[in-house]
Image: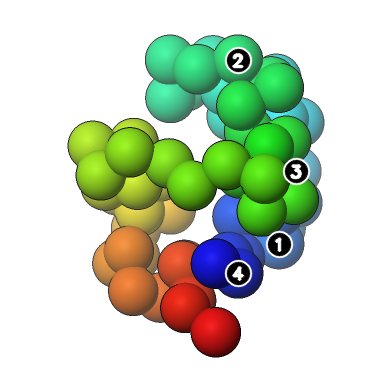
Amino acid sequence: MRNDVRALREAEGLSQAALGAELGVSRQTVNSIETGKYDPSLPLAFAIARRFGTTIEEIFHVD
């Protein structure tokens, strides 16, 4: 699954660690989501979407 988490995070000048802290996950988890190695749980996907003021569908894309 592709996603736009990295682009959204970088557009706001956030580090992976800072975003992870806001979401209650580790920097490694953010990195794994961004690189497509880990698909977040539904509650985490909602938290990411809420953090960036958008929808899950606009962030995560099924190829």
Tag 2–tag 3 contact (CB < 8 Å): no
Q: Nearer the viewer, residue 28 or 15?
A: 28
When asked about the image quadrant of residue 47, the answer is: top left
Give the number of the disc on residue 7: 1
Q: Earlier in the sequence, mark 1 or mark 2?
A: 1
The kind of residue on which mark 1 rests is Ala
Decide if residue 12 is in sight here: no
Give the number of the disc on residue 2: 4
Depth check, mark 1 against mark 4: the one in front is: 4
Q: Earlier in the sequence, mark 2 or mark 4?
A: 4
Residue at mark 3:
13
The number of numbered discs placed on residues in the rendered structure image is 4
Q: Earlier in the sequence, mark 2 or mark 3?
A: 3
When asked about the image quadrant of residue 18, the answer is: top right
The kind of residue on which mark 3 rests is Gly
Tag 1–tag 3 contact (CB < 8 Å): no
As helix, strand or loop, the secondary structure at mark 3 comes to: loop
Depth check, mark 1 against mark 3: the one in front is: 1
Q: Earlier in the sequence, mark 1 or mark 3?
A: 1
Circle 2 residues within 10 Å: few <14, some 14–19, many ≥20: some
Tag 1–tag 4 contact (CB < 8 Å): no
